[in-house]
Amino acid sequence: MKKLLNFDTMLTPKIITLFYYLMLIGVLIGGVVTIFSGEILKGLLVIVLGAAFTRIYCEFMIVIFKMNEALQEIRKK
């Protein structure tokens, strides 16, 4: 608990993981709604490309926090 209060550990990567799964659910729902509106190909593209871009965005955010952790390790040495 002390590490969390002193900002020694990052909480945001855990939030990003939760955000990723919520975004995936949103992409899936959006794709299914598009499919049922009669645009099957567009709905499939929404699901596939939406999932890919969601993953890329969240991985980019995680990389930023990993870089921060690596810099903290270097600073400690």
Image (spheres, helix red, strand yellow):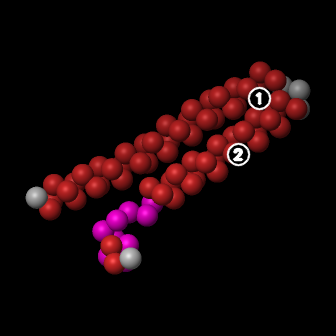
Give the SS element for disc 2.
Answer: helix
Q: Is residue 5 above or below residue 39?
A: below
Q: How far apart are marks 2 and 1 (CA)?
A: 13 Å
Residue 19 in the magenta stretch? The answer is no
- Residue at the far left in the pictured view: 77
Q: What is the residue that sits farthest to the top in this orientation?
A: 41
Q: Would you identify the image quadrant in which residue 76 lies?
A: bottom left
Query: Residue at position x 45%, y 42% from top?
Result: 59
SS at mark 1 in the image: helix
Ranked by sequence position, the earlier of labels 2 and 1 is 2
Q: Which residue is drawn at 53% across and 38% down?
A: 55
- On screen, residue 14 versus residue 48, left or right, reads left
| Horizontal side, residue 74 vs residue 34: left or right | left
Tell me the residue at 43%/64% (across/down). 11
- The label on residue 26 is 2
Query: Could you tell me residue 36's position as x and y percent?
Result: 88, 32
Residue 44 location, x and y as percent?
A: 73, 26
Tell me the quarter of the picture where residue 38 sits. top right
Q: Residues within 10 Å of mark 1 (few under 14, many from 20)?
A: many
- Label at residue 43: 1
